[in-house]
Image: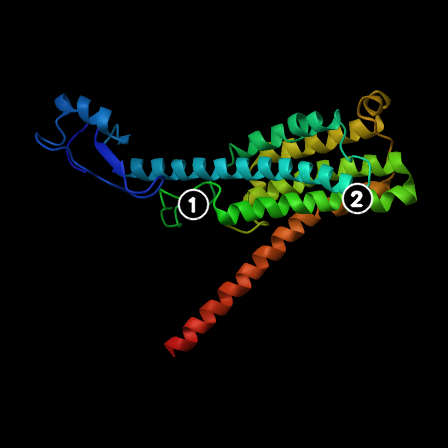
Amino acid sequence: MGGRARGVGLRLVHAFGWPSIHLPHGGPPWNPGTTGLRELAADMVLTDDDFSTIVRAVREGRSIYDDIVKFVRFQLATNIGAMLALLGASLAGLPAPLTAAQLPWINIIMDGPPAMALAVDPARDDVMRHPPRDPEERILNARRLFAISRAGAVMALGTVVLLALARPACGTDTALTMAFTAFVLFQLFNSLNARADDGPVLGRHQFRNRTLWLCLAGVLAVQVVAVHLPWARTAFGTVPLDATQWALCLGTASTVLLAELAELAELAVRAAQSALRGSDRAV
């Protein structure tokens, strides 16, 4: 970039997008002795004359923005799912699938660690291949709101249906424990959905956040404790589940991931059809 500037004032054309350099008016642009006001007025200050510093800063900014989106998607989908599950069970004449003791357990213990792990998710390999986003774009745009609502609805529907089907076969106490367990397990798959905002749900990037996987393993372990240890059963009003019942809970919870995969597959088919129509017109 020339010169040995201690600081260069920059303006970002798009938030977390490619920057353009706006030099100050008047005076030598890289005079080390007159950079104080420029640093105060700048959106970004370079501490060296290496342009790759900008690239690293933009990459980090995009990664932070993506992590905010993941955190919000995960938390809102869980809260919407819990509210819809309680509402749906009430309308269906079923007992509440989540008790007053279980709701804080879900919100603090089951959701907290995975959500914090999503907030420090490593950047994807293709994070710099995307065009700059619109600075006026909302975090909760229409597409993300639909994805969040869909995930919440799937979690609620799965929880209520499992409760309704298991109640006559296993008894009310076991059915309620299964509904509670299924809702907790929904969060394991929902965390994977939250990481796939603009990319594949299943891919190498899913295995790069070791903290998240440790948190998910911990969530599963403490849920086993809540279901099988006597003192925990007393606190949360649960009863032990056998292997078949655990498998039913896990299968029900996986539907939120299958719904996301089906949506992405449909989008991929539409994109392929559009590309084929474009090539036909070109010919």
What amino acid type should be assigned to the residue bearing mark 2? Ala
Q: Which residue is mark 1?
A: 127
Residue at the location (91% across, 41% down)?
Answer: 170
Q: Are marks 1 and 2 in contact (CB under 8 Å)?
A: no
> Could you say which quadrant of the image residue 191 lies in?
top right
Numbered circle sitting on residue 92:
2
Task: Judge left or right: residue 56 versus residue 7.
Answer: right
Q: CA distance from mark 1 to mark 2?
A: 45 Å
Place of residue 8 in the rendered image (x, y in percent of width and height, measured from the top left)? 21, 31
Residue at the location (63% across, 35% down)?
Answer: 79
Numbered circle sitting on residue 238:
none
Task: Judge left or right: residue 236 versus residue 70.
Answer: right
Disc 1: CA contacts within 10 A as few (<14), some (14-19) or many (>=20): some
Task: Judge left or right: residue 16 versus residue 9.
Answer: right
Q: Nearer the viewer, residue 277 or 89?
A: 89
Disc 2: CA contacts within 10 A as few (<14), some (14-19) or many (>=20): few
- At mark 1, the secondary structure is loop
Residue at the location (74% across, 46% down)?
Answer: 158
Foreground disc of the pair 1, 2: 2
Q: Residue furthest left?
A: 27
Place of residue 69 in the rendered image (x, y in percent of width and height, measured from the top left)? 50, 39
Whether 280 is drawn above or below 44: the answer is: below
Place of residue 111 in the rendered image (x, y in percent of width and height, measured from the top left)? 64, 31
